[in-house]
Amino acid sequence: MRNILTNILDVFFPANCKVCGKKMKIDRKVCFCAECWNSLKTIKEPFCVYCGKQLSMPNEHFCADCTVSRLSFVDNRSAGVYQGVLKEALYEFKYKGKKRLGKYLGEFMAAYLKENGGLEDIDLIIPVPISESKLEKREYNQTEILADYLGKYFEIPVIKDVLIRTKDTLAQYELSREDRFKNVNGAFDIKNPVKIKWACILLVDDLLTSGATADECSKMLLGSGASQIRVFTLARGL
């Protein structure tokens, strides 16, 4: 019955790809045509060795921000650049209830790690938590879905009851770089610190732009006994 209904919808109400507008079957990759989805590409060198920002010159190793100051985590690696298909996919996943996209985006992240490494000595995976109000509105934490996929794929424990969000914050995209760091100051706390004692942690988030959120989370985790924090995000802002 479901297949019959889907076929009818495909004929009378064909879905359009969110990127190119091409008409497609309703079940085709949730909201993107195969061509656009397959155009997703991982970040390639050169990128900043610390924050993972894409660089323009092949002999560059550090971005302008990281030459001035270092953040609390060892490094960040991102699967792709926050533009085009990946930007649209993250928007649909995060704000439009397209929870099923988590599987495909998780596959994209896993493929990056499988090809480029980055899990050496990692003991635990911890997703960046969202506020209670956002969780109530979305009904899921998109970052937890990505972390769960990676944990299952690479057989690494995912811990969700240590790093907690204690307050709502303004949307980071509305703020300057300086204000982003102020905005997340004191927004996180630690419970059950014994679970992360001496652990090398992979902190997982959906997007890294200024690095303010990852920096604040890393400070809390390191201050509670973790030995090292590495960050892995789905996308890296330009």
Image (cartoon, rainbow, N blue to C red):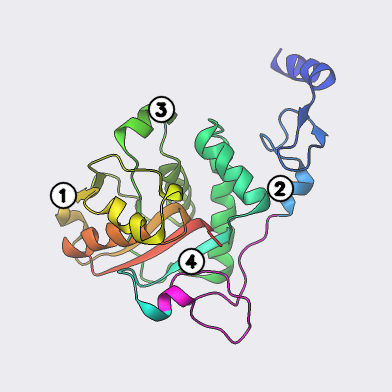
The residue carrying pointer 2 sits among few (fewer than 14), some (14 to 19) or many (20 or more) residues within 10 Å by Cα, namely: some
- Kind of element beneath mark 3: helix
Q: Earlier in the sequence, mark 4 or mark 2?
A: 2
Residue sitting at 29 percent across and 39 percent down? 168
Q: Is residue 161 left or right of residue 193?
A: right
Q: What mark, if any, has residue 192 been given in the picture?
A: 1
Q: Is residue 193 magenta?
A: no
Q: Report the residue marked by disc 4.
A: 77
- Residue 69 image position (x, y, % from top left): 35, 76
Q: Earlier in the sequence, mark 1 or mark 4?
A: 4
Residue 26 seen from this side:
yes
Amino acid identity at mark 2: Trp
Instruction: In the rendered view, tell whether residue 203 sits above or below residue 161.
Output: below
Q: Earlier in the sequence, mark 3 or mark 4?
A: 4
- Residue 84 image position (x, y, % from top left): 67, 51
Asked whether 81 or 170 is in front, the reply is 170
Amino acid identity at mark 4: Arg
